[in-house]
Amino acid sequence: MTQFPQPRSGPRPLPLLLALEGWILQSSFAGLLTSSGAWPSLNQTPQDHPPENDPVRLLAAEAAGQSPSELKGPWQTHLDPVRFLDALTRQSHDRMNSFVAGVRAYQAHPHRRAIEPLPAVWKRGAAMLRSAGGDGPAVLYVPSLVNRAYILDLAADRSLVRASAQAGLGAYLLDWGDPTDAELAFTVTDYMEGVLIPAMEELAARTGGPIRLAGYCMGGTLTAAAAVLRPDLVSRMALLAAPWDFHTDSEAARALMRAMQLPLSMMIDAEGKASVDLLQGLFASLDPTMAGRKFRGFASLDPASEEARRFIDLEDWLNQGVPLAAPVMKEVLSSWYGANDPARGSWRVSDTIIDPAGIACPTLALIPSQDRIVPPESARALAVKIPGAVTRDVPFGHIGMVAGGSAPKRIYGPLIEWLRSTS
């Protein structure tokens, strides 16, 4: 009997995403109704002609039964308030229905990630060192603690780790795993001293010398700390969108983060961890319109297309997150985002201040210019502190740089070539 995959419950947290989409539509509805462009009695003069793609003009044209280009003269004179309100209501319904259709199409789609996880060659608690093979210089890829490690091994044609092995590196991936009950009490220092550095020691012992390190996102911040703590284990280092200065956002964004610290801490204390839904909710807050754009776009795709399958691979990865240990989350909130300790030179792992100026190994920093999660200037702040670091801006977003369709050619190749170099 044919076994069909179970429907997905995501995207997570679905109630929040639905509420956000409804709030955005409601706010847009109210904004258009009070817009000075909507009614001739308000501030717009007859000489003012909005472009044909202006949302109010489009709705006015629909209400008048004409194309935007057919509205001659002061276009507001064509506006029938009752028909305009009806057109606006229909458009709002259509947008919400399209979003829901995209979500349902995603939930029911039969595609699942096609490749098997890389084999584990070492374990420490929940963490595993996974090997992609290769017999060249060893490189350890270090992902963020916040999401699944397999973003660096997403699919056969979008796997930075496997591409590295195929290009002649001994490629390994540090998979942090789902934290055990004991690990839910871990601090950043515990992860550094209890997992990352032991993994580096294991790999150096296996391969007979210092290793290459490549850290992505939060994994890059931890990688930089490892290079400070154990320079004897690191021969070369790459940092991919690694945050360092947590105050590069606007003052309004910083004020919001300060205001959220107490309620977030209370939520973490109540659960004993930062849950997947809490983390995903925080990511959604960085761009509240993203979920709507994504799933309306997915609703229009051919379900059998490669584009649809790639969307699902990424969306499944996002929704299969891992909880974060409460002490780690609190340190990130207070020490990183609150006090900005890394950029201020006061971040400590155990008793050691993590000063990037002490990193002596050759370092490459890839900084995605379209990153909404780690602002480019946040990552650049780390690169400029490392003596002799090479900085390359790349025209990608945070996830696209490692898992986008053009990442293998434009990111993997140059990065692997740099990691293989001995000069």
Image: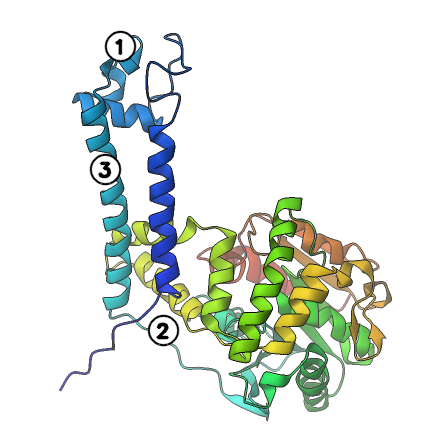
Q: Compared with residue 171, is residue 316 higher up or lower down, i.e. above or below?
A: above
Residue at 53%, 68% (x, y): give it.
160
The amino acid type found where label 1 is placed reads Lys
Q: Please, what secondary structure does the residue beneath circle 3 have?
A: helix
Asked whether the residues under the numbered discs 3 and 2 touch, taking CB atoms below 8 Å apart as contact, a structural biologist would say no
* Mark positioned earlier in the residue sequence (2 or 1): 1
Residue 389, horizontal then vertical, whole percent = 78, 58
The amino acid type found where label 3 is placed reads Thr
Mark 2–mark 1 distance (CA, rounded to whole Å)? 54 Å
Q: Compared with residue 87, is residue 211 higher up or lower down, i.e. above or below?
A: below
Q: Which residue matches tag 2?
A: 113
Q: Compared with residue 152, is residue 379 higher up or lower down, i.e. above or below?
A: above
Which of these two is toward me, 96 or 245?
96
> Which mark is nearer the camera, 2 or 1?
1
Label 3: few (<14), some (14–19) or many (≥20) C-alpha neighbours in 10 Å = few
Which of these two is toward me, 310 or 47?
47
Residue at 77%, 63% (x, y): give it.
341
> Which mark is nearer the camera, 1 or 3?
3
Q: Which residue matches tag 3?
A: 89
Q: Which residue matches tag 1?
A: 72
Question: Which mark, residue 312?
Answer: none
Asked whether residue 216 appears in the rendered view, the answer is: no
The quarter of the picture where residue 19 lies is: bottom left
- Taking 22 as reference, is 231 left or right? right
Q: Please, what secondary structure does the residue beneath circle 1 have?
A: loop
The amino acid type found where label 2 is placed reads Arg
Residue 216, horizontal then vertical, whole percent = 61, 66
Mark 1–mark 3 distance (CA, rounded to whole Å)? 25 Å
Residue at 49%, 55% (x, y): give it.
285
Residue 271, horizontal then vertical, whole percent = 51, 78
The quarter of the picture where residue 181 lies is: bottom right
